[in-house]
């Protein structure tokens, strides 16, 4: 039963990510030099975002309710310090196609990751893969990781932030080590962009990261 519950909750999380990706795809398909098309696109985007936000709240409530009722934490973040046998995981991962930070992630399905000397499989949403990498970075350089809420690259002109010391600053906050929270209400490419910035901050080469994709369903 626990595997079935986990699969359902992962699918729900995946749908949330795909809906955000679809919003980006539609917006980028609009001719922004066409005033009428831009106006129609803006109206669509406004209504779509409102409905996706409502769905996101409902999906989050359902996920919490199921996990509380079943007394499980099936979607908790994986700690890089507690990983299965690396050789077994790597052998499993080698069966899958890889993707990099230079690629398009929209509508792709993650499965696992290699970073540094660590390997982890069964990370089936971009959020969970991203959380795993963040936890790895927190272990690699705790002092630098603790400064992320203050970094200008994670702040928009309107003052919105991606990392914070308070979950109230974020729409959908995920707890990370050292009292840091990160925004996880994001599409696949947004997580990719976050990682591009993080790799520069931590002075990491992109080649140190290998991301594996699940096989596409026919």
Image (cartoon, helix red, strand yellow):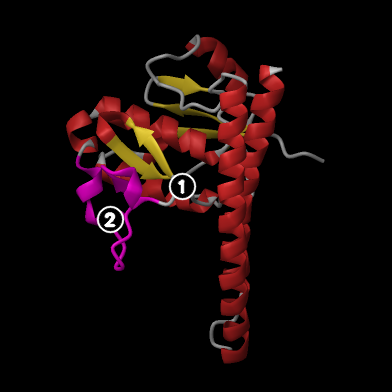
Query: Left or right of 71: which side holds 197?
Result: left
Question: 75 above or below 159?
Answer: above
* Mark 1 element type: helix
Residue furthest to the right = 218
Q: Say if the magenta span includes residue 1.
A: no
Residue 200 placement (x, y as % from top left): 29, 46
| Residue shown at the point (53%, 49%) measured from the top left | 188
- Residue 153: mark: 2
Q: Can see residue 53? A: yes
Residue 128 placement (x, y as % from top left): 50, 34
| Residue shown at the point (57%, 64%) measured from the top left | 50
Residue extent of the magenta highlight: 147-170
Query: Left or right of 116: which side holds 151?
Result: left
N-terminal-most mark, 1 or 2 = 2
- Residue 191: mark: 1
Residue 49 placement (x, y as % from top left): 57, 64
| Residue shown at the point (40%, 21%) measured from the top left | 80
């Amino acid at each position: 039963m626990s595997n079935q519950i986990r699969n359902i909750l992962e699918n729900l999380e995946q749908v949330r990510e795909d809906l955000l990706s679809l919003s980006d795809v539609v917006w980028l398909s609009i001719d922004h030099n066409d005033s009428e098309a831009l106006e129609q696109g803006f109206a669509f985007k406004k209504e779509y975002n409102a409905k996706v936000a409502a769905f996101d709240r409902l999906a989050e409530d359902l996920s919490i309710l199921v996990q509380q009722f079943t007394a499980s934490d099936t979607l908790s973040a994986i700690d890089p310090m507690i990983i299965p046998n690396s050789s077994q995981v790597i052998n499993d991962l080698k069966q899958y196609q890889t993707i990099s930070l230079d690629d398009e992630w929209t509508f792709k399905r993650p499965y696992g990751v290699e970073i540094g000397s660590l390997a982890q499989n069964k990370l089936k949403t971009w959020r969970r893969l991203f959380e795993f990498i963040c936890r790895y970075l927190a272990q690699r350089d705790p002092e630098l990781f603790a400064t992320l809420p203050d970094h200008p690259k994670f702040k928009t002109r309107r003052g919105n932030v991606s990392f914070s010391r308070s979950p109230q600053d974020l729409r959908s906050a995920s707890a990370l080590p050292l009292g840091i929270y990160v925004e996880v209400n994001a599409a696949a490419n947004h997580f990719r962009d976050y990682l591009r910035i993080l790799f520069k901050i931590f002075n990491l080469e992109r080649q140190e990261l290998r991301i594996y994709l699940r096989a596409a369903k026919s």
